[in-house]
Image (spheres, rainbow, N blue to C red):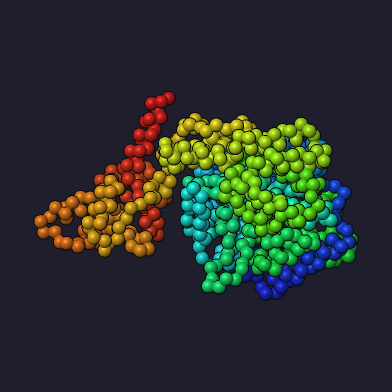
Amino acid sequence: MGEERVRLASSSSKSDMQHFVRQLLQDVQAFETMLEGNWFEDDVLRIGAEQEMCLIDKHYKPACTAMQILEEFHPEWLTTELAQFNLEINLSPQRFEGDALFNMESELRQRLGELAKVAARHDSRLLLTGILPSLRKFDLHMSKLTPKERYAALMHALRKMRGSDYELHIVGIDELIVRHDSPLLEASNTSFQVHLQVRPQDFVKMYNIAQAVTGPVLAMAANSPLLFGKRLWHESRIALFQQSIDNRKSRDHLRDQSPRVTFGHDWLHKSALEIYKEDITRFRIILGTDIEEDSLERLAQKVAPKLKALQVHNGTVYRWNRPCYGISGNGKPHLRIENRVFGAGPTVIDEMANSAFWLGLMEGMSLAHNDITKLMSFDDARDNFIKAAKMGIDSEFTWTGDKKVNARTLMLEELLPMARAGLAHRNIEPEHIDRYLGIMEERVRRHSNGARWILRTFSKFKKETSVDESLTTITAAIYEHQTQSRPVHEWEIPELGQFHQYDPSKLLVEEFMSTDLVTVHQDDIVEYAYSLMDWNDLNYLPVEDEEGHLQGVVTAKSIMRYLSSPQKEEGKTVGAIMQLHPRTVAPQNTITEVMKIMRKEGVKILPVLKNKELIGLISEENFVDMSRRLIDRLSKE
């Protein structure tokens, strides 16, 4: 959705929105007329891509410097993204032949290099990653939204339709259940979006192939298994994207409703127009814009219209394989399929290998199968997509002929040879085919992709250090490997301190506190509280109510005083002996501030509250553990 001058449908006048809807319907009519009249370019096929990225600071945390960078450096190929710690590079279209893939890689490296030099002057670095491991929930506050009218309008529209906070619930090795007050959660995702121009007469066939191969392609490219320190899906972006902007509400009835992030509901049958019509049918219009062009008048003048109204609405519906309309340099309209499943990174060469595999597979499968819908069901294609997002390279798919096959076997025996044949058919240089598809083959043989590397590394680090240091070290390792341009299957599991010296002095309470809490309620008997302390080797228990609000604290000292009293009363409750109004801290306090509070007030444990809700504890033991780890590491150097 590149249109800047958008406005909320709900805040526009009735006549303005009626005018926009009329223009939208005219765009659909114009699109149909162009299809029937063979207006579309069909004598050349092109490829292209969009590179999203994160900006990080010297501590490997998000750096909200995008607008400062763009103020200094604003080539036409560089643009904003949703959050101020993101940017996007647009690559030039390449004819899908010969050196196209190598030229795309060279251009991407050149533009990243130019941008990195400017970012460095703003104390920022570029990082290619599907979800930034070191990203924290408070980095997604609405104050971090890029100050552009279209982003604010989109966020407001989605929030208004939702009518309540957004909730994430994703289960993998760990489980994440978290509430957030805005759809800016979507800014956690960064991707490498690949475009393939197709002939209009081939669009149905090619789009169905794109849907069919999404699962296996995603399985091999998965690299986003971490979010807020939780090990979730191998490609958590898939669940995160859908849930972060999902405006559906739970209801008593079983009415079907589609999320705005969707894989689709059926194979395509007639033309790309089916998708646009379905999206207008299923999804309310939430944004409008001033339309100066009458698309039907432009057709009468024999000029391809921009279809701005259709573009704006298409930009508020997020299909993983999205149809795109554009106008080529020769003035002819064209159709593209945009593959949105690839996460950014973990390196440029990995992204290019993913792209070559998908592009080759699209071409190779179109040569091998005239109609993929005759060989597998749409439900299996969608199921394969979800399996790949959850399990990545470890997935097992239902493939053509209803056969069950694991991802690695399918790759080696069928898909890689098919992709090679497809790239060869497009006359891609043989050495380039070997370069890119060789990387995919090595991932299979070594059973290693970005997701598996991150999961193995994080699981190792969790046994050795804090979650924050684990995530920071993983981010540092990704950055260093990107600078060396080593494909991810060659990455070793790093050691703590190998790529940077961890500095905890700037940590916030939210990044450092304990969240796995043992608590009691006021009406629990004292003996129950004593047992919990004894079993879990604790000397302090927060007292909370049913809503998670802190009521007080009870200490081992107060319990022992009660239990040793000759006048103790049977059945006495925690509420009778708890300390009211304990000293607390907020998640945004720094650990330096916490240390000062502990020293000044002589306390060893502090509850962490957010809007009166107990969200964690921070104790002297946290500091002792950190010190012990740092001393141990220094002693080994």
Please count the marks in the image: 0
For residue 290, side relative to residue 38 (left or right): left
Which of the 4 image quadrants contains residue 284?
Answer: bottom right
In the displayed orientation, state which residue is furthest to the bottom. Answer: 14
The quadrant in which the C terminus is found is top left
The quadrant in which the N terminus is found is bottom right
For the point 65% across and 46% down, which residue is it? 405
Q: Is residue 366 above or below residue 152?
A: above
Q: Is residue 131 above or below residue 200?
A: above
**In the foreground, 253 or 373:** 373
For the point 49% across and 40% down, which residue is it? 458
Q: Is residue 9 above or below residue 105?
A: below
Q: Position of residue 328 (x, y in %)?
A: 82, 51
Which of the 4 image quadrants contains residue 610?
Answer: bottom left
For the point 38% across and 50% down, which residue is it? 516
**In the foreground, 67 or 237:** 237
Q: Position of residue 374 (x, y in %)?
A: 76, 56
For residue 72, side relative to residue 37 (left or right): left
Viewer can see residue 315: no
**In the foreground, 383 or 44:** 383
